[in-house]
Amino acid sequence: MIKGLAITPPVIGRISIGRVVEKNGKRLPEKDDQFTITTQIQTKEGWLPHPLDEAMRKETQGSKLRSIPITLPFNDPDLNLRAEYTFFERKSGRPLCAGDGEACRRHTDKGLESLPCPSPDLCDYGSHGLCKPYGRLYVQIGDDDELGCFVFRTTGYNSIRTLAARLRYFHAISGGNLATLPLELKLRGKSTTQSHRAPIYYVDLTLRADQDMKEAVTHAREEAKGRGTLGISQAELDKVAQAGLMNAQFEYAEDEGLQVVEEFIPEEKPAVSGNAVDPSNLRSRLAKQ
């Protein structure tokens, strides 16, 4: 295995709740109130729809696509949902800093350093609005590719918090059989004072509408047992996936960073480079917090 290259789940498509549109010569994100399933090919008009998108829309009989039946690739909740505070450089898409609220890896004049991570609101380095929670949920749709995943990317606290909670709850209830539990991505809406009472949409994870908890857990347990009988080792798959993710300091390449900046961080912010803050002064300020 090449050291320094993160081996992430193989992505064969995307799930989004918005798109990037061109307005006044600028490419800007536009929120939506439904899911869109796309390929990984992007043209001037946007991401090309995946054939599954049209197939699922036909099943809704003209309604908006607000639920998607899925399964998860891994039993470990933290492998299915990868989330960190992340600071991408705007022009290059290069990840400059990523942390979990306690510790971070940051590019500085001295190279890659491990530093405290007090979260974006309390960090001088991330206080410019370019450091955000960044989550990637990996799911499987259909059975055409049993190892291929669709990825839902978000910088929204509501989606990340809800998905993290659901994954842990379902992991506990199913006896750890997340990968065989029949689930559904569901789009939900709410309004807050910060949204000025306008609706905002986030992604939730639920059991499928046609199954109750007992049926779903029974199915998950029997399916897991059947796979084990056939010699399919979910535990080994999780182990290999974890090792691949830990093979590099950052899990995402610059091309992914550019997509995230375009889709989630479009506003012009004060220019901040990886060397804009003196690391020694930053450490001293953080130590006083």
Image (cartoon, helix red, strand yellow):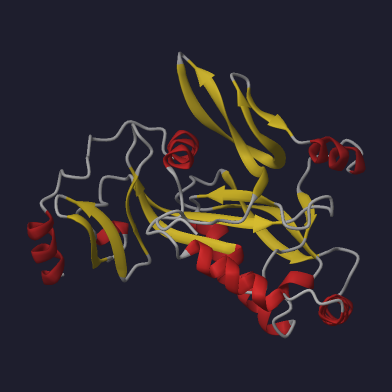
Q: From the viewer's perspective, is residue 39 above or below residue 158?
A: above
Q: Position of residue 238 (x, y in %)?
A: 62, 72
Q: Position of residue 154 (x, y in %)?
A: 53, 49
Residue sticking out furthest to the front: 1
Which residue is at a point 11% across and 63% down the rendered structure image? 285
Along the horizontal axis of the image, is 64 left or right of 160? right
Q: From the viewer's perspective, is residue 285 above or below residue 59?
A: below
Along the horizontal axis of the image, is 64 left or right of 287? right
Q: From the viewer's perspective, is residue 183 above or below residue 145?
A: below
Which residue is at a point 66% across and 60% down the rendered structure image? 204
**Where is residue 241, by image quadrant?**
bottom right
Q: Position of residue 240 (x, y in %)?
A: 59, 69
Along the horizontal axis of the image, is 10 left or right of 231? left
| Nearest the eye: 160 or 31 | 160
Counting the numbered discs, the total is 0
Which residue is at a point 50% across and 18% down the rendered structure image? 23
Along the horizontal axis of the image, is 162 left or right of 60? left
Q: From the viewer's perspective, is residue 79 above or below residue 272?
A: below
Q: Position of residue 234 (x, y in %)?
A: 71, 74
| Nearest the eye: 228 or 94 | 228
**Where is residue 180, by image quadrant?**
bottom right
Which residue is at a point 34% across and 67% down the rendered structure image? 101
Quadrant (top left/top right/bottom left/bottom right) for the C terminus: bottom left
